[in-house]
């Protein structure tokens, strides 16, 4: 757990930012908290790459595609088209979830192979 603190802090900050955005009228603070959480998660992935535990591959394309779809959905939601927003945000979130599943499986496989 000691080496995963940046991931845990990132997820917690991202969750807090989302909850602040949903339940408050604060305009900038939720976004700052969400971006800070994202930076912590990115730094965790960079550490995995540096330590050669994770080797980036095609799953980064899945993540980029998911993020693009999600941001397009946010754009449509802000401009009053919530049906189109749903059509973009749901697949975007599913692709981001797929990225998480793939990276976790790859990290577990790499750690298991290093212990053999």
Image (cartoon, rainbow, N blue to C red):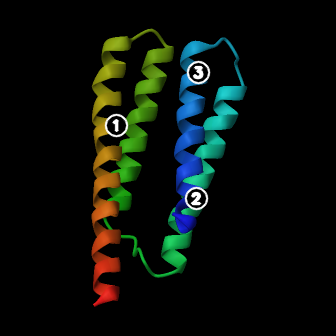
Q: Position of residue 83 (x, y in %)?
A: 31, 13
| Residue at the farthest front position | 1
Q: Residue at x 66, y 11 (%)?
A: 25
Disc assigned to residue 21: 3
Left or right? Give the position of 10 relative to 103. Answer: right
Please name whichever residue, 79 or 34, is drawn nearer the observer in this view of the structure: 34
Query: Measured along the vertical axis of the image, is residue 40 above or below residue 52?
Result: above
Whichever of callouts 2 and 1 sits on the residue coming sooner in the sequence is: 2
- Residue 93 — which label? 1
**Real-space Cα distance between discs 1 and 3?**
18 Å
Q: Residues at badges 3 and 2 in contact (C-beta under 8 Å)?
A: no
Q: CA distance from mark 2 to mark 1?
A: 24 Å
Write down the quadrant of residue 114 in the picture: bottom left
**Vertical placement of residue 36 versus 113, above or below:** above
In the displayed structure, 7 sits above or below 74; it is below
Residue 49 position, x and y percent, is: 49, 74
Residue depicted at x 32% and y 21%: 86
Of labels 1 and 3, earlier in sequence is 3
Q: Is residue 109 left or right of residue 52?
A: left
Q: Residue 5 got which mark?
A: 2
């Amino acid at each position: 757990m000691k080496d995963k603190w940046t991931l845990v802090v990132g997820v917690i900050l991202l969750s807090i930012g989302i909850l602040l955005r949903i339940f408050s009228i604060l305009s900038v603070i939720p976004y700052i908290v969400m971006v800070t959480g994202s930076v912590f998660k990115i730094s965790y992935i960079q550490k995995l790459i540096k330590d050669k535990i994770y080797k980036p591959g095609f799953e980064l394309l899945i993540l980029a595609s998911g993020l693009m779809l999600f941001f397009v959905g946010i754009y449509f939601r802000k401009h009053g088209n919530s049906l189109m927003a749903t059509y973009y945000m749901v697949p975007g979130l599913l692709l981001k979830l797929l990225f998480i599943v793939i990276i976790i499986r790859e990290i577990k496989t790499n750690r298991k192979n290093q212990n053999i």
